[in-house]
Image (tube, rainbow, N blue to C red):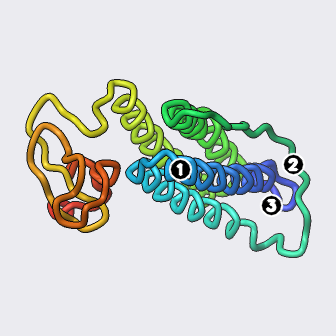
Amino acid sequence: MSIDFQHSETRENLMRAFAGESQARNRYTFAAEEAKRQKLPVIERLFTFTANQEKEHAEIFYNHLKPLAGTTIEIDGGYPIDLYPTMEELLKTAQHNEYKENDPIYKAFGDKAAEEGFPAIASSFYAIAAIEKIHGDRFGTFARLLEEQKLFSSDKQEAWICLNCGHIHTGPMAPAVCPVCHKEQGFFVRLSMMPVTLQSL
């Protein structure tokens, strides 16, 4: 069936998604600031990296609303208050929220858009749902490493890269201090976990 966009449920779902992504961006920015206070630059950058992607998601959803420029869309919705003292809790709740966006929220929004006759919007919901699953997996990995006290150590040889200067150290543990730029251990991350590595170029 095809429904007039002005009277569709999809227009409301787009605004809900825009609001949700905008809030997620801010929550992750706040979490990044907390990670910085706790001297965990790796986690700070993880949250900032994801926050920037949430901003892009918000823009995609918002741009679908261009035909309704100048109008106001009233929506209801529930949004989490993720104020926790530990990085493990912040990472775990971020993981939970990302998984919830993946399924059921965005998959349901995509299904509704397809049902109402908006295939391009449905495609955006499905594609971003898949990305949110990746976000959730990534947050979960870092939460597990923190819980197991293995964020900077491993049971095997690893290549560790300093996020400040790019120095690469090989060993079962990241150095306490970077021998090149003298930044603390919190700047090191497994090279394999970098967003961009030489192998992916």
- Identify residue for label 2: 75
In the rendered view, tell whether residue 65 sits above or below residue 168: below
In the rendered view, tell whether residue 9 sits above or below residue 68: above
Mark 2 or 3: the one toward you: 2
Q: Of callouts 3 and 1, which one flags the residue occurring earlier in the amino acid sequence? A: 3
* Disc 3 + disc 1, Cβ < 8 Å: no
Instruction: For mark 2, give the secondary structure.
Output: loop
Rendered location of residue 184, percent (x, y): 31, 53
* Disc 2 + disc 1, Cβ < 8 Å: no
Q: Of callouts 2 and 1, which one flags the residue occurring earlier in the amino acid sequence? A: 1
Q: Count residues near mark 1 (Cα–Cα under 10 Å), then give few for <14, some for 14-19, many for 20+.
A: few
Q: Residue at x 71, y 57 (%)?
A: 18
Instruction: For mark 1, give the secondary structure.
Output: helix
The residues tagged by marks 2 and 3 sit, at their Cα atoms, a distance apart of 15 Å
Residue 2: in sight, yes or no?
no
Q: Which mark is residue 5?
A: 3
Residue 139: in sight, yes or no?
yes
Residue closest to the eye, 46 or 169: 169
Q: Count residues near mark 2 (Cα–Cα under 10 Å), then give few for <14, some for 14-19, many for 20+.
A: few
Rendered location of residue 68, percent (x, y): 83, 70
Q: Residue at x 41, y 53 (%)?
A: 41
Report whether 146 appears left or right of 113: left
Q: Residue at x 18, y 33 (%)?
A: 154
Question: Three-letter amino acid code at disc 2?
Answer: Ile
